[in-house]
Image (cartoon, rainbow, N blue to C red):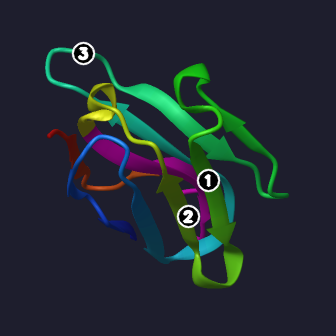
């Protein structure tokens, strides 16, 4: 019903930058909060950043000042610009979108994940 397609991950050196994208498609009536989570091996999935329908952002303390979340409502897309990347940012990054659908009502949907590896 709803699909999220992520892109933009890859291998980058410390101090480098990456830009992640997540595009939603399907039977979407409305998109509410959009966000990014990450999960490193052996750890829980944690919130990185989220953005409200009105554009108000929230960030984990570990990424404040380095990451920027934004959204393009016309394209049903959320972005995460990551600057000054550190090795501890290495993780699989997942987008999460709160969607009001035509058929099943409100539900969170997850992207397939995109790997970000920060290493020299």
Nearest to N terminus: mark 3 or mark 1: 3
How many residues crowd around disc 2 within 10 Å: few (fewer than 14), some, or many (20 or more)? many
Are dots 2 and 1 in contact, CB under 8 Å? Answer: yes
Q: Earlier in the sequence, mark 2 or mark 1?
A: 1
Which callout, 3 or 1, points to the residue nearer the camera? 1
Q: As rendered, which of 86 and 52 lies closer to the eye?
A: 86
Cα–Cα span, label 2 and label 1: 7 Å
Name the residue tied to disc 1.
69
Q: In which quadrant of the rendered view does residue 66 lie?
A: top right
Q: Magenta part of the protein: which range?
A: 92-108
Looking at the image, is 7 positioned above or below residue 53?
Answer: below
Helix, strand, or loop for circle 2? Answer: strand
At 59% from the left edge and 83% from the top edge, which residue is drawn? Answer: 75
Check if mark 3's residue and mark 1's residue have beta carbons within 8 Å: no
- Residue sitting at 65 percent across and 66 percent down? 71
Q: Residue at x 31, y 66 (%)?
A: 8
Q: How many marks?
A: 3
Residue 39 quadrant: top left
């Amino acid at each position: 019903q709803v699909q999220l397609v992520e892109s933009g991950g890859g291998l980058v050196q410390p101090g480098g930058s990456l830009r992640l994208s997540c595009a939603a498609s399907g039977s979407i009536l409305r998109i509410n909060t959009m966000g990014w989570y990450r999960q490193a091996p052996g750890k829980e999935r944690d919130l990185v950043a989220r953005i409200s329908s009105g554009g108000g952002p929230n960030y984990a303390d570990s990424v404040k000042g380095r990451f920027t979340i934004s959204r393009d409502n016309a394209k049903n897309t959320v972005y995460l610009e990551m600057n000054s990347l550190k090795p501890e940012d290495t993780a699989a990054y997942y987008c999460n979108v709160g969607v009001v659908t035509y058929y099943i009502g409100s539900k969170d949907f997850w992207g397939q994940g995109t790997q970000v590896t920060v290493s020299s």
